[in-house]
Image (cartoon, grey):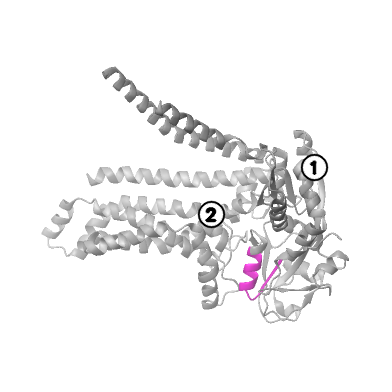
Amino acid sequence: MKGRQSLKEKILKNIFLLSSLTSIFFLIGITIILFKEGLPLFREISLKEFLWGKSWYPTYDPPGFGVLPLILSSLWITLGALIVAVPLGVSTAIYISELATPKVRNFLKLVIEMLTSIPSVIYGFLGIVVLGPWLQKLLNLPIGLCSLTASLLLALMAIPTITSLSEDALFSVSKDYKEASYALGATKWETIIKVTVPAAFSGISTAVLLGMGRVIGETMTVLMVAGGAAVIPHSFLQPVRPITATIALEMGEAVVGSAHYHALFSLACILFIFSLGLNLTADYFLTKFRRTSQ
Amino acid sequence: MKKITQTLLLISLVLTLIVPISQAEGQLVVQGSTTVLPIAQATAEVFMQNNSQANISVRGGGSGNGISALIEGTCDIADASRPMKVKEILLCQEKGVSPVPHIIAMDGIAVIVHPSNPVQGLSMEQIKDIYTGKITNWKELGGQDLKIVVVSRDSSSGTFETFSEIVLKGEKIIPESLAQSSNQTVATVVSTTKGAIGYVGLGYISNTVKALQVNEVIPEQETVVSGKYPISRPLYMYTNGAPQGIAKDFLEFIWSKEGQEIVEKQGFVPLQ
């Protein structure tokens, strides 16, 4: 009986091991496919032409595979979203963790978490139908689908990530710190600004970086509302075309095995490197934060 | 005993999911151009009503997508709003696929603007100048003092290719143009943007946008069939080799009087 039990345990253990290995397998597989399909592009053009080229004309003859406008569009929209989402998200987190009564806190947390459950296509739809036309009228723009519209919607999508992770970080700041601060005669406000927030800084940085990852990888919303003009952005009021939207827009029609196809995969590699970098940095901050808060 | 039954049940369930869908008899997978999609969908519905054993699944994805699916063998009929490219034909030869084109309908590409725009028509030259950035304000064309918002399709769509070939004649479209992912989104953007100009298949003209005359010809079925309307094209369905079995029946149905009536109802131009 005992032998059977341990055999069963062994089998179960291996099943779980196998399932945890699956995700590693997929990660490695995806990385290999991305680079295997992306790298052949550089037989036709140089890396410099790809990264610094300013014109994206993948289907013309001769084609233009300059992705600088697409990369800058992605970063531009992300920047805009962070300008809105970081102050809003972090101050919400401070309110929830330090100031709100338990009832209000639970209610707010629920509402913010519900924001995550809205599918991105619905954000995009709202952008086309409500926010875009409204901004167009308000600012007297030629078109409502521009980087501002996209940034505002993406900010809304990043706020839950930023708020709940920042709130965790603030909440886990040791009570001793706060009490020491009060004991020195600091007010609540001074304690928050000078003690709690600095102590939770690396956790908040993680939150911001992961929020940024959410924004830079978002596809459906930007495809619908960013406008889709492959130009180098110099204003928040002009249409732009981020990396994700370009891939989604063109992959369906690209001839498999053509330079265009490889270029889209190379774009995906760039996006992948961005996200990986963000996640690794966020991870670094998180471990640092764990060490300091202990 | 119970466990064994459960395991078998699970295995058979997994197996049914793995078995490729297109292998079964009476099955037909149609995939490709979003322009041809409404025709394929509407005809497939009626065809399935008439033939109870037929099961046609229709997907969009774009002309290139459909053609590569035909080459990979994951679809039986590829919808395309453009003829195959040299590169695709070479790929077919490599994979031992012999694509056969079938023209199933004609399509006109209408140039559309916001209903409030006073401009009634443009010449091909003017449209080209707008899309290449030489004309940037409606007042240059007798309209209001309003910046022109150029709406276009993603540069790999069949509609873009046809428009680009017929109207732009290979010249580069301005990068500031808004690349939209489908005929419907082009129509939506144009209907909500005062200074916008866009182009869509004839089937997507509605009362929320205004279709312009091109070279003084109204885009409508008669002018496309007679060849008077300058921006028009044939729509294709590709099969691997001569169509057989259900694919043959389906194509013959589309060519029949009933099928061409459906084509017309969807806003496209029948072959006769």
Residues at discs 1 and 2 both on one chain = no
**Residue on which disc 1 sits:** B243
Task: Residue lying at the far left in this picture: please name it.
Answer: A183
Residue A91 position in % (x across, y down): 31, 63
The residue that appears at 57% across and 39% down in the rendered structure is A34
Quarter of the image with the N terminus of chain A in it: top left
Q: State yes or no: discs 1 and 2 in contact (Cβ < 8 Å).
A: no
- Quarter of the image for residue B25 reads top right
**Residue on which disc 2 sits:** A219
Pick the front one: A220 or B128: A220
For badge 2, the amino acid type reads Thr
Q: Which residues are magenta?
A: B185-199
- Quarter of the image for residue A234 reads bottom right
- Between the C-alphas of marks 1 and 2, the distance is 38 Å
Mark number, residue B270: none
Height in image: B134 above or below A197?
below
- Mark 2 belongs to chain: A
For badge 1, the amino acid type reads Pro
Q: Secondary structure at mark 2?
A: loop
What number of labels is visible?
2
Pick the front one: B150 or B39: B39
Q: Is residue A258 visible?
A: no
Seen in the image, is B172 located left or right of residue A163?
Answer: right
